[in-house]
């Protein structure tokens, strides 16, 4: 039987929302693996009120270590939106094939297994969402 590369079509364009937490950076590690295996295009998204693009870029570049190219996007919060809504809007506007994200972010409650932003994205995203712990 001939090998198929169907999986590579499922993960052509991947969105990786990061907030600086270790889980979000592990999600970035997984996206890097997808890039190396399937040639996936990686877009890193950071949603914030007061974005420091240089700080986020340095954090991502330190983790990637020059292995792949990536697109960095920042989306700013305002009074009428939320982090999960901004992530979902990005997914819908850019037609991503999948999202890889941390199961929980920078929340201070260690009893929470899956964060509210992740749950909202899993529930409402029209694409595959892979969560990383």
Image (tube, rainbow, N blue to C red):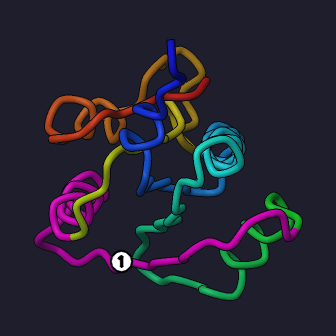
Residue nearest the viewer, comparing 104 with 11: 11
In percent of the image, x 26 and y 66: which residue is there?
A: 90
Q: Position of residue 61 (x, y in %)?
A: 79, 71
In percent of the image, x 36 and y 36: which residue is there?
A: 118
Q: Looking at the figure, which quarter contains the C terminus?
A: top right
Furthest-front residue in view? 1
**Quick check: 62 left or right of 46?**
right
- Could you tell me which secondary element the residue under label 1 belongs to? strand
Q: Position of residue 8 (x, y in %)?
A: 47, 41
Q: Quadrant of residue 83?
A: bottom left
In percent of the image, x 64 and y 37: which residue is there?
A: 23
Q: Is residue 58 above or below residue 12?
A: below
Label 1: how many Cα within 10 Å (few below 14, some 14–19, many 20+):
some
Q: Is residue 133 above or below residue 37?
A: above
Residue at mark 1: 75
- Per the image, is 91 magenta? yes
Magenta part of the chain: 66-93
In percent of the image, x 53 and y 14: which residue is there?
A: 111
Q: Is residue 30 above or below residue 42?
A: above
Q: Quadrant of residue 39?
A: bottom right
């Amino acid at each position: 039987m001939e090998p198929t590369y169907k999986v590579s079509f499922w993960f052509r364009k991947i969105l990786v929302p990061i907030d600086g937490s270790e889980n979000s950076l592990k999600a970035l590690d997984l996206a890097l693996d997808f890039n190396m295996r399937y040639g996936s295009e990686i877009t890193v998204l950071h949603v914030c009120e007061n974005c420091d693009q240089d700080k986020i870029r340095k954090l991502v570049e330190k983790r990637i270590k020059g292995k792949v190219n990536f697109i960095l996007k920042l989306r700013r919060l305002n009074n009428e939106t939320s982090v999960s809504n901004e992530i979902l809007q990005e997914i819908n506007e850019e037609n991503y094939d999948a999202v890889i994200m941390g199961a929980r972010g920078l929340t201070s409650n260690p009893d929470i297994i899956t964060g509210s932003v992740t749950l909202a994205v899993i529930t409402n995203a029209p694409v595959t969402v892979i969560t990383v712990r």
